[in-house]
Amino acid sequence: MGNDYTGKHRIKCYEDLTFADDFMFCKILQNDPGLCRELLELILERKVSMALSVESQKTIEITADAKGVRFDVYLDDDEDHVYDIEMQTTTKKHLPKRMRYYQGMLDLNLIERGAQYEELKQSYIIFICLENPYPAVGLHKYTFAYTCRESPGLILKDDAIKMILSANGNADDVSPELSAFLRYLATQETTSDFTKRLATKVETARQHNRWRGEYMTLEEKYREFMEEGHEIGIKEGLERGREIGIKEGREEGLERGREIGIKEGREEGLERGRELGVKEGLEEGLERGREIGIKEGLEEGRARGRAEGRAKGLAEGRAEEQHNTEREKQRADSAEKALADRDAEIAALKAEIEKLKRQIL
């Protein structure tokens, strides 16, 4: 079963080609220099020399092993100007760098070995795009020339101009005629004399049998190229997919291993931390308990010492008091006895005196 190249790979029927299609664009401009000059004047907003040479699909290859370029429509005149006009129906990546490369190849083609730099002609690289490469800006026309960052008004004057036209702009920045041309590219509406003549040229070209044959040959080569490219792409894609799969599998494995390692490490760390925490907690608890025990023991010892001292002091005080009481009592008894003895002696003396008195009498 053959491959059905549809969608973005579908090749248009010759009758469906428009001026925006590369084959029709190149054929019409190459075979009508006047129309080509009129288009240039519309874009540049100035007159272009009548002595204009037009060449389509011009190929430049500086060396056999270097990347070459193929210009859609290449023009030069007798006033030292060269032009490259490219039609872009889809948004291309790296458009600015592509223009840079085209500019370099154009310059290398213009100057011969040993020639002076002054011999370089003023060049215009012009890309006509159906999409807008700068949608946030929304212009129909972008013109680029080198200026000084430090002094924006200072122009390098290297005579290299790059222009981008967009059929998908929303600003009022171009002439009505150029606006009508860009609208025609996007919608096929003919709203100016120039676009009507372009539409007539396209319709006439659709009836051109030799061009139809060239296109069909090109179409067949393109289909073969696509089929070959498809097979090569599948093979390379499988190989590349395998390499990417191995790489992503390795990366995913490493990532998964890292996650598992982190998880297991965290769990082991928590367990080890718990064990260390318990051990250190016990040690700290014992140490703290010992300190608290010593402190509380000291306090309790002081309290008990104070209590025992107070009790002992009270007991000794009571014993001393009792001793003193007994001693005082003994003293009192001795004094009482002494008084009694004295009273007895006095009574005896009184009795003796009475006895003596009686004897005297």
Image (cartoon, helix red, strand yellow):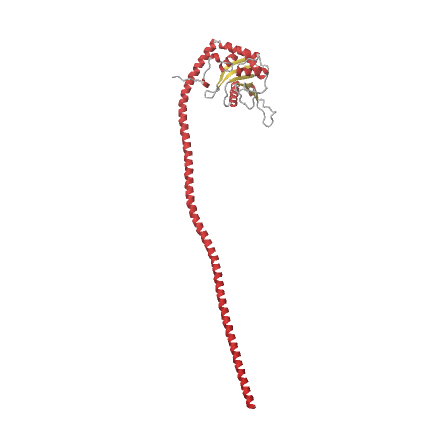
Q: Quadrant of the C terminus?
A: bottom right
Most foreground residue, 71 or 64: 71
- The residue closer to the viewer here, 73 or 301, is 301
Residue 83: name its quadrant: top right
- Does residue 306 lie above or below 94 as drawn? below
The spot of residue 275 in percent (x, y) is 41, 45
Task: Judge whether residue 230 can be spotted in this image.
Answer: yes
The residue that appears at 48% across and 59% down in the rendered structure is 303
Closer to us: 264 or 329: 329
Residue 227: which quarter of the image? top left
Q: Residue at x 41, y 40 (%)?
A: 267
Q: Is residue 113 visible?
A: no
x then y, percent, for residue 177? 58, 15
Quick one: 306 or 97, which is closer to the camera?
Answer: 306
Q: Name, please, the residue furthest toward the left.
A: 1
What is the count of numbered marks? 0
> Residue 70: where, in percent of width, then height?
49, 17
Q: Name the residue: 52% across, 10% down.
A: 201
> Where residue 35 appears, x then y in whole percent?
55, 12
